[in-house]
Amino acid sequence: MKRVLCLISGMNAGGAETFLMKLYRQLDKTKYQMDFCINVFDKCFYEEEILALGGKIYRIPPKSVSRVAFKKQLYDIVKANHYNYVLRVTSNAFGFMDLKIAHRAGANVCAARSSNSSDGEGLKAKVAHKLGRLLYSKYVNVKIAPSDLAAKYTFGKKDYERGSVNILHNAIDINKYGFDANMRLHTRSKFGISDDIMVLGHVGRFMTQKNHIFLLEIFSKYIKLNKNSILMLVGGGELESKIKQRASELGIYEKIIFTGVRSDVPALLSAMDLFVFPSLYEGMPNTVIEAQATGLPCIVSNTITREADITGLVHYLPLGNAGEWANYFEQLPHVIRGTPIQKFKENCYDIESVTEQFVNLIFRE
């Protein structure tokens, strides 16, 4: 049995965590296992499933609480459990430092998986990122990214151009995420949404990166053009109360469905009519890939990589003018929903082929 230790802040329903779980479910558990070292002490969204699949969860304090304790406990976990394979999921190259610790504790395969194409605009984050590349990249012997954009940001243009970064797409189980007309009707009925209502949707954590405030401004403009419309926001997070307050200020709160964190995302996507995703930055957004699998048209910010459009259903708009987004929605042609299975397979976004890639990269099979 080969076990990989995944270093990640937590295992809640974020994009990187969800991608890891998609891979984990596909692994042959008689040969491979995934364990997780996290920095949160509350119960995580995926915790029960991880334990049911045979995985282990280790909890250590974040570096922000105690850098000394973090280093010692991570070292002890890798050393005591003889982890030969360690995967660090990070959006900032300073996270490579953790692989230095794993390497010293005996890990031979030290892999880093990029999860973003930026870490925001803070000076501290930018300096840490550059420092991480300079000091710790030598401890990374497997480099993984979800897109070309994320690869260049996390590992540098030189590494990307010399082909030393492996692109591992945010794949999905196409059979799970395909469009389901009956599920659409059932889900809309459950939320009290009639057939004549236009449902704009978004799936993502309530955080600055996802740009919910701008999304609310877009919807406040759009509802003036189409009164028979609602906004469905799927997810939770630290800014949820602030977003709700802003929705009230704009007078649109009653036209928004806040679903919270959900495990039935495919059904919710089938219930939507348009997916709106105005993020400030992304590595390769899982939810945009999932939305396309249900044949859902997607309007996204032009900060997102063009690689995200694997079906021709993705439209890119610049951030800044909410009215332009609202007007664009009205001009979109009607789309007959379906499941573009072949396009996902042609572009290597089916979970089976990506899991095979993952096994070859991490376990050197």
Image (tube, grey):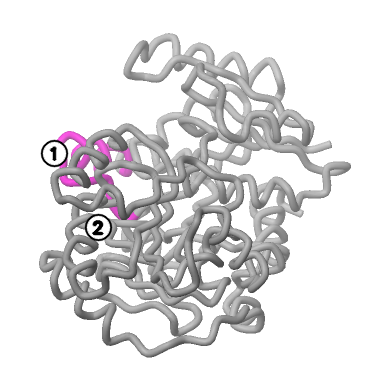
Give the number of callouts: 2
Q: Residue furthest bottom?
A: 333
Marking on residue 215: 2
Mark sitting earlier along the chain (2/1):
1
Q: Assign a secondary structure to mark 2.
A: helix
Determine the residue positioned at 39% across, 57% down: 202
**Frontmost residue, 135 versus 33:** 33
Magenta range: 117-133
Residue 12 magenta-drawn? no
Q: Residue furthest right?
A: 30
Relative vertical location of residue 247 with respect to residue 86 in this rendering, above or below = below
Q: What amino acid is found at the position of numbered circle 1 in the picture? A: Leu
Taking 191 as reference, is 2 left or right? right
Q: Position of residue 131 (x, y in %)?
A: 26, 38
Q: What amino acid is found at the position of numbered circle 2 in the picture? A: Leu
**Frontmost residue, 204 versus 20:** 204
Taking 152 as reference, is 343 left or right? right
Q: Give the residue pinned by disc 1.
A: 123
Relative vertical location of residue 3 with respect to residue 359 in this rendering, above or below = above
Q: Where is residue 76 in the image (x, y as percent from the top left)?
A: 59, 14
